[in-house]
């Protein structure tokens, strides 16, 4: 499994993952959202977890001028869950930004609590910078 940064050439592969997730991600891959999310990906720092040409997971984040890195989206393909892919992606973000705090915007609190991340208000701190 390779974890690498997203490039525009990966767009169709990433949207395949989003479509595979169904209605929960339809705001991103549906007719009204696909172009908008494609533009957001161009201005974000996005990581892909790939097995060959299959995107098994991804995270989309933004760096806030030295005040921290915020992860907005984290998703692992259903058939690949339970393999610590999400954790490996988060570890890659932390390695790439060693001097900054890393936060995740979450609606899946139990997952991040299980990883041992500390909740700070409505977000989880992955690592203090």
Image (cartoon, rainbow, N blue to C red):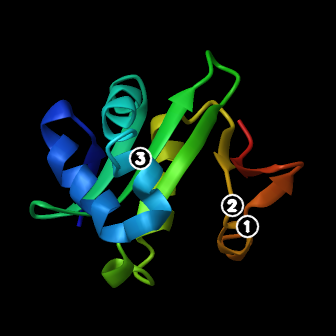
Seen from the viewer's position, the closer of residues 22 and 107 is 22
> Is 95 above or below relative to 43?
below
Quarter of the image for residue 119 reads bottom right
Camera-near label (3 vs 2) is 3
- Image point 34% across, 49% down: which residue? 29
| SS at mark 3 in the image | helix
Camera-near label (1 vs 3) is 3
- Image point 68% across, 55% down: which residue? 106
Q: Residues within 10 Å of mark 1 (few under 14, many from 20)?
A: some
Q: Which residue is mark 3?
A: 28
Kindly indicate whether the residue at mark 2 contacts the one at mark 3 (C-beta within 8 angstroms).
no
**Mark 1 to mark 3: distance in Å?**
21 Å
Q: Which residue is mark 2?
A: 107
- Percent x, y for residue 12? 16, 47
Between discs 1 and 3, the one toward the N terminus: 3
**Mark 3 to mark 2: distance in Å?**
16 Å
| SS at mark 1 in the image | helix
Direction front: furthest residue: 31
**Mark 2 to mark 1: distance in Å?**
6 Å
């Amino acid at each position: 499994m390779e974890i690498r940064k997203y490039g525009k050439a990966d767009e169709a592969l990433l949207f395949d993952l989003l479509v595979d997730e169904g209605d929960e991600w339809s705001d991103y891959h549906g007719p009204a959202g696909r172009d908008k999310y494609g533009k957001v990906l161009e201005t974000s720092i996005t990581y892909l977890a790939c097995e060959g040409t299959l995107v098994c997971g991804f995270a989309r984040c933004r760096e806030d001028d030295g005040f921290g890195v915020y992860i907005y989206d984290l998703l692992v393909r259903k058939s690949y869950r339970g393999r610590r892919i999400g954790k490996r992606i988060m570890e890659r973000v932390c390695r790439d930004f060693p001097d900054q705090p890393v936060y995740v915007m979450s609606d899946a609190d139990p997952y991040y609590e299980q990883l041992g991340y500390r909740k700070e208000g409505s977000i989880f701190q992955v690592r203090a910078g």
